Image (spheres, grey):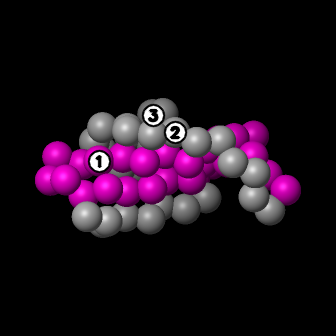
């Protein structure tokens, strides 16, 4: 969660565990103070950020 907070400050509103490309991935949805929603994908095994999709309203 610290990795997600560093990449996308705000309130974590949802966490999903999905399987994609042969990997388990945690998908975090974060809402920033300005109301923008971001999606951050984390490799569940390695702990690295896979994608950081941002600025959804």
- Badges 1 and 3: C-beta atoms under 8 Å apart? no
Q: How many marks?
A: 3
Q: Residue 3, can we see it?
A: no
Q: Viewed as shown, does residue 18 lie left or right of 35?
A: right
Seen from the viewer's position, the closer of residues 56 and 50 is: 56
Expressed as whole percent of the image width and height from the top left, the position of residue 23 reads: 79, 52
Q: Which residue is mark 3?
A: 2
Q: Which mark is residue 49?
A: none
Residue range highlighted in magenta: 22-49
Residue 26 is situated, as x and y percent measured from the top left of the image, at 61, 44
Q: Residue at x 28, y 42 (%)?
A: 10
Tell me residue 42's x, y (percent).
60, 48
The answer to which of marks 3 and 2 sits earlier in the sequence is 3
Query: Residue 21 occupies which quadrant of the picture?
Result: bottom right
Helix, strand or loop: magenta stretch: strand
Q: State the residue position of label 1.
A: 31
Q: Does the stretch in magenta take in 37?
A: yes
Q: Which residue is mark 2?
A: 15
Q: Quadrant of the C terminus?
A: bottom left
Closer to the camera, 10 or 37?
37
The secondary element bearing badge 1 is classed as strand
Residue 45 in percent (x, y) is at 75, 40
Return the disc, 2 or 1, that comes first in the chain's sequence: 2
Tell me if label 3 and label 2 are in contact, CB under 8 Å.
Answer: no
Residue 40 colored in magenta in the image: yes
């Amino acid at each position: 969660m610290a990795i997600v907070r560093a990449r996308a400050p705000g309130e974590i509103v949802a966490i999903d565990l999905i399987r994609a490309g042969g990997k388990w991935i945690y998908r975090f949805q974060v809402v920033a103070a300005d109301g923008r929603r971001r999606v951050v994908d984390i490799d569940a095994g390695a702990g690295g950020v896979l994608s950081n999709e941002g600025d959804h309203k």
